[in-house]
Amino acid sequence: MKHELPIATEVRPAVNLANLATAINAEHVAGDAMIQKGILHYRQAGKYLIEAKEACGHGNWLSWVKKNVRFEYRQVARYMKLAKCDVTSNLELEWSAIDGNAAPEENGEVPEEKRFLTISSWEVLKAAERQRALSPPSSEEKFNDQGDSESIGWALWSWNPVTGCLHNCPYCYARDIANRLFEPKFEPVLYPSRLNAPQNTSFPMEKAAEKPSHKNVFVCSMADLFGRWVPAEWVEAVLDRVRTAPQWNFLFLTKFPIRLSEFDFPDNAWVGTTVDCQARVANAEKAFRKVKAGKKWLSCEPLIEPLHFETLEVFDWLVIGGASASTETPAWVPPRAWIEQLHSDARKAGLRVYLKRNSGILTQEFLWDDPTEEATEAPAALRYLIPKDQKA
């Protein structure tokens, strides 16, 4: 009979943590490269699809797709939109934001005016018409699957029943994407059929058990749902759908936190506010003393100046990040000292902390050993809420 040593007394070689760290970082880089390579393939497929559509002629496109293409039309739509993106843009962000849920009509297109409601068109509707708009017929709309992309690594799904924003932040990547790809551009609009997405999206039980971010849905990643311009009925319609899908976590983020107390949030709502500069701190602390939600979180992305809070205890979770380049602002990695101080304050207050890849911390072995002088303030293009006593 074969005898084996008990696990507790098994002799194991010493673990070389430095080698493990090198291997972990190498796998991370390789994984990112594979994601980016895959998106380039999707983009090329989109170019071929555009060429095929032109060759098919009017009225023949949809039947050709059904006969020859081995994936759903919503993916066809996503590939074609991706193909129209500038190759110099951040294709990973573009891909995660593109809505591929449009259901084709006979000619393979969906007129935008039938798919969304602007605020001005909403305001002229009668009560019964509004009710019908918020109770759309069944559709095939689903959440956008972001794969394992780390552009928004804490939520691997996004859902945009409302898009558009009026904050006009200079660094907004969502505005850049919307202005290139969406018919209403960045005007606030409601897509009624997208309200069906929670009931249409299959819950990834096995993946969620392995990686919790597979059950997290970033709601209105291309909007501020709680902006003062958004009709309360739109917000309530979204929250009603959230209540019907308790298996998912729905993550909300706003720069207008005072309005959050107007709504009742279910337990599966993670409610957050963005604080990018000190001018937003007081409102965030005041508002979140009144907010009741399953989780309350704080996003300091981009962190464009050092922040000081009095009551971080009103939050459960902190996300820290930098900024991707936009059409108006450069890419930005916050100074390490700012991040470390905020991280330390959050830990003392009992918060969990998530450092995004664009914070620079995940590559600190390479970044912080760089002999070049570290910045002490964000570029002027990023700083837009400047205290009166600091203005020239």
Image (cartoon, rainbow, N blue to C red):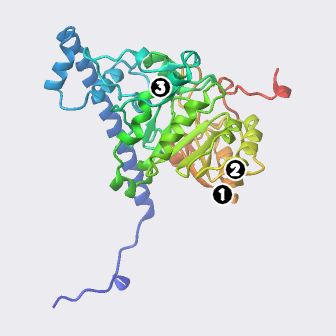
Foreground pick, 106 / 210: 106
User: At label 2, which amino acid type do we have?
Assistant: Gln
Tell me if I can see residue 224 in this picture: no
Read off the residue under disc 2: 341
In terms of sequence position, does the residue under pointer 3 or pointer 2 come before the other? 3
- Residue under the image location 86 percent in, 27 percent down: 389
SS class of the residue under badge 3? helix
Q: For marks 1 and 2, give the CA distance.
A: 10 Å
Amino acid at circle 1: Arg
Q: Is residue 30 left or right of residue 319?
A: left
Q: Nearer the viewer, mark 3 or mark 1?
A: 3
- Closer to the chain start, of discs 1 and 2, is 2
Q: From the image, which quarter does the N terminus lie in?
A: bottom left
- Residue 167 lies, with reference to residue 335, above or below; the image says above
| Residue nearest the viewer, comparing 87 with 66 | 66
Vertical arrangement, residue 142 with respect to residue 210, above or below: above
Which residue lies under the disc numbered 3? 133
Q: In the image, is residue 31 above or below residue 133? A: below
* Total numbered labels: 3
Which quadrant of the structure image shows residue 16? Answer: bottom left
Which quarter of the image is occupied by the C terminus? Answer: top right
Residue 273 x/y as whole percent: 64, 40
Estimate the spatial distance between the alpha carbons at disc 3 and disc 1, rounded to whole Å.
45 Å
Q: Which residue is mark 1?
A: 347
Looking at the image, tell me whether mark 3 or mark 1 is earlier in sequence order.
Answer: 3
Q: Disc 1 vs disc 2: Cβ atoms closer than 8 Å? A: no
Q: Secondary structure at mark 2?
A: helix
Image quarter for residue 10?
bottom left
The image's mark for residue 157 is none
